[in-house]
Amino acid sequence: MALFDYLLLGVALLLLLSVISSKASTQLGVPTLVLFLGIGMLAGSDGPGGIYFDNPWLAQSLGSAALIFILFSGGLDTKWREVKPILWKGVLLSTLGVIFTALIVGCAAYYALNFSIHEALLLAAIISSTDAAAVFSILRSRNIGLKGNLRPLLELESGSNDPMAIFLTTGLISLILNPETSPLAMIPMFAQQMALGAVFGYLSGRGMAYLINRIRLDYQGLYPVLTISLVMITYTATSILGGNGFLAVYLAGLSLANHSFIHKRSLMHYHDSLAWLMQIVMFLTLGLLVYPKQLIPVAGIGLFICFILMFMARPISVLICLLPFRDMSIEERIMVSWVGLRGSVPIILATFPLIYGIDEANMIFNVVFFVVLTSVLVQGSTIPFVARRLDMEMPAEPPRKAIPEKMLEKEIWGSLVELKVFPESSAVGRQIADLNIPEDTWIAVLRRDGRPLRPGGSTILQAGDILIAETSEHSLEKLRSVLGDKAGLNRNGQLET
């Protein structure tokens, strides 16, 4: 029992150090993932912690499980109205952009290293996806925003390009293990995985919203458990049926986020916290797996690959993919190419060759780890400078105040509107979550028969109910039409026109 207690204490201390390091990340302007990895490396066998960990299968399993919830949370945080104008740009970057990056880096690795063409392309495929979470952590720490639609474009690309990198990695491993297989066999496999992943992801998101609104659990704390189970079912069912499970969970989160459902605010906060926990666990595990002493011999090769990746492969792939879009300036294209940081996914994918016994697996893993660290440190530290030089910098949006703080502000109270649910309204007998109320609308209080009630997503409206809501002028008319109220009353009981 004492061994378990010490193990639990060690895990708790590592988590605590990771959380505290996030504060240091804000002060230093260094992405949190670097500090998480650093803590794992210090705790490992080459560091003062002395923890021996050499289990690629366990690291890959933990990383894949963590990635499922990270991608779902990323989809949940993605706003469709912001993504819609740049949808095709993001799709091209997350598909063709990944392929072009892998081809350019793969050719360079083939001529520079003693690798076969498949092994060189495998190394390139592993580092072909980007991680915008590292970028935005730096921007938030420096209080920097990006002009135009750059932020949603980077969010969409980074959230949706991991499935393509995973497919290329697993496909190339299959070609290495089965040399008689034709590379053309990957084309129908790719079409099947992406098509099924997209369809199952969208349908799963719709199904999640329907089930959450209809199940009416007695305990609010069970709703996060419900969504966790649905996310895992989405991934496993899609994978078993031949689709891309990672793409499915991302699109499920995106589809769910753009529908009204019960306890939406609390569930989104919960999955954001869960995603942070998964990132910490994943980075600590990967940090434990690496041996820092083994990174020194591959430093020269790693720097060469980084140079090709940052100054050739990424810019060329971005310029080609964005060529059809005339609404983007050259400065915006350069900015997109420079913020293509590598993140956690390449390190997870680098464990695949170790598991399958690829000849150059150790070399690939160490080179990938070195490339990720160099990319984050070099590109990450220069993002604010590049943004200023390209005139892409703007002040970051201040964080929105929590609702309880808003309730204390007199001017906010003055902007609230009272709306009545009329007997002929289609809202009568329906849950608030089913009304598809605009996202910028918050129903603060419901009055029924003169008594104030606290409304929730599962509250069923009745004729004569009075809703006190905060909303924008743009959404007010839509809210009135939903409730059947042709005109609302303000806080003083005066008619709103």
Image: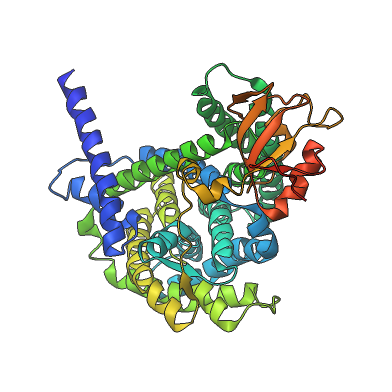
Q: The N terminus is located in which quarter?
A: top left
Comparing 148 with 372, the one in front is 148
The residue sitting at 25% across, 54% down in the picture is 38
Comparing 461 with 100, the one in front is 461
Q: Is residue 341 visible?
A: yes
Q: Is residue 248 above or below residue 296?
A: above
Q: Is residue 53 visible?
A: no
x and y percentages locating residue 384 in the rendered image: 39, 73
User: Does 294 sit left or right of 128 as displayed?
Assistant: left
x and y percentages locating residue 88 in the rendered image: 69, 64
* Residue 490 sits in quarter: top right
x and y percentages locating residue 92 in the rendered image: 65, 65
x and y percentages locating residue 257 in the rendered image: 62, 43
Question: Please, which residue is most extreme toward the right here?
Answer: 424
Comparing 186 with 431, the one in front is 431
The residue sitting at 81% across, 31% down in the picture is 422
* Residue 76 sits in quarter: top right
The residue sitting at 57% across, 73% down in the picture is 317
Q: Is residue 430 above or below residue 46?
A: above
* Residue 15 sits in quarter: top left
Comparing 387 with 176, the one in front is 387
User: Does 385 sit left or right of 217 as displayed?
Assistant: left
The residue sitting at 72% across, 38% down in the picture is 419
User: Does 129 sit left or right of 436 as displayed?
Assistant: left
